[in-house]
Amino acid sequence: MSNLQTEITEAWKAAMKSGDTQRRDTLSTLRAAIKNAEIENKIPVGSLDDDAVQQVIEREGKKRRDAIDEYTKVNRADLAEREKVELEILAKYLPEPMSEAEVTAIVQSIIQATGASGISAMGAVMKDTLAKTAGRADGKLVSGIVRKELS
């Protein structure tokens, strides 16, 4: 079992013992998503590496962000707040997100290194940028910065 999986399992156990139902439920859902990823990839249970576990956490976090947007649109502040709390719980298991300035610097260096110009080069720049910012920057943020820098 990866270090991150072990950490999540220990936190889940602690939440069960303390009676923290929101944390317990969020971590239970996360553990199930990790197990589903193992099944989908046809690998033994408990053998996902930390990078793969982080990808699962990122997917779960994206689901929460999308749900917050939807609940906010339909004026369900109570449900949006619950999703925000779940997102905060998940965020503890992800690396520190990059700032907009850090992403901009990476995009500018990639554009300079590849000589990319114009919006037609967006795909190549996006691919390189996402590889360098993996797990630390939101795809929408990266896309917006790449588009701005190439314009």
Image (tube, rainbow, N blue to C red):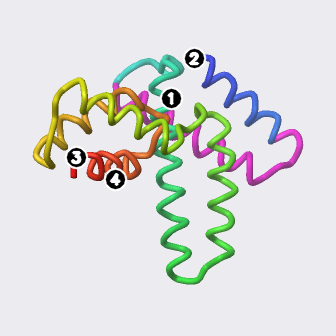
Q: Is residue 143 magenta?
A: no
Residues drawn in magenta: 16-41
> Disc 4 to disc 3, how far (Cα)?
10 Å
Where residue 144 is drawn, which disc sits there?
4
Q: Which residue is mark 2?
A: 2
Mark 1: which secondary structure? helix
Q: Which residue is mark 1?
A: 53
- Depth-wise, is mark 4 or mark 2 nearer the camera? 4
Q: Nearer the viewer, residue 28 or 57?
A: 57
- N-terminal of the pair, mark 4 or mark 2, is 2
Q: Quadrant of residue 64?
A: bottom right
Q: Which residue is mark 3?
A: 150
- N-terminal of the pair, mark 4 or mark 1, is 1
Check disc 4 and give the amino acid type: Gly
Q: Main secondary structure of the magenta part?
A: helix
- N-terminal of the pair, mark 4 or mark 3, is 4
Label 3, residues with CA under 10 Å away: few <14, some 14-19, many ≥20: some
Residue 95 x, y percent position in the rendering? 58, 31
